[in-house]
Amino acid sequence: MKMLHLRALVLAATLAVPMYILAADKKAEKPKPYPLATCLVLDEKLGGMGEPYVFVYQGREIKLCCKSCMKDFNKAPAKYIKKIEEAEAKAKKLSANPSGGSQSSSSHSHFFSRSRSNCRAR
């Protein structure tokens, strides 16, 4: 009988250790950083009303200008998460094309070379 209790105790300990490690890994994961400089709900600059209200929602850091904006966020969180995702996509697109895509670098050099030639003619 004592052997049965001992086996059960060893089995429980064996299962508990991996679960503890898994739980510790979840806590160690950092949330995805907040990409905006404005309140997600009101589009007001963060810090204008004091320290922003910061929380984590589905692995994402969320910043609001105040705690009362939390009510609006909770009414339609998908709407606000979409807003963050759009900002992230826009930032990623800009970082992939830093010139903004308006003119190529060759057109810039052409413009400057024409400007210099016009200056020499004077």
Image: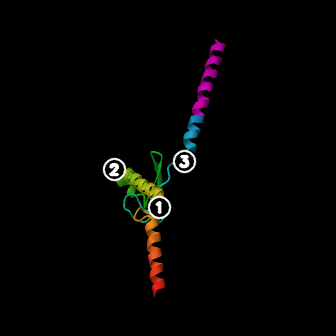
Q: Main secondary structure of the magenta part?
A: helix
Image quadrant of residue 83? bottom left
Do the residues bearing badges 2 and 3 touch, measured as CB atoms within 8 Å?
no
Residue type, label 3: Lys
Secondary structure category for the residue under label 3: loop
Q: CA distance from mark 2 to mark 3?
A: 24 Å
Residue sitting at 39 percent across and 54 percent down? Answer: 86
How far across and how far down the image is residue 31, in percent?
Answer: 51, 48
Q: Residue at x 50, y 50 (%)?
A: 32
Q: Which amino acid type is shown beneath numbered disc 1?
A: Pro
Q: Amino acid at mark 2?
A: Ala
Which quarter of the image is occupied by the N terminus?
top right
Residue 49 shows in the view: no
Which numbered disc flags the more N-terminal residue, 2 or 3? 3
Structural distance between the alpha carbons of marks 3 and 1: 28 Å
Residue with the mark numbered 1: 98
Q: Which residue is mark 2?
A: 76
Point out the stretch of residues depicted in magenta: 1-20
> Which residue is situated farthest in the bottom direction here?
122
88 sits to left or right of 79: right
74 vs 15, left or right, is left
Dot 1: within a 10 Å radius of its alpha carbon, few (fewer than 14), some, or many (20 or more) residues?
few
Can you tell which quarter of the image residue 41 is in? bottom left
Q: Is residue 5 magenta?
A: yes
> Residue at position x 54%, y 47% from top?
30
Name the residue that disc number 3 marks: 30
Q: Is residue 17 visible?
A: yes
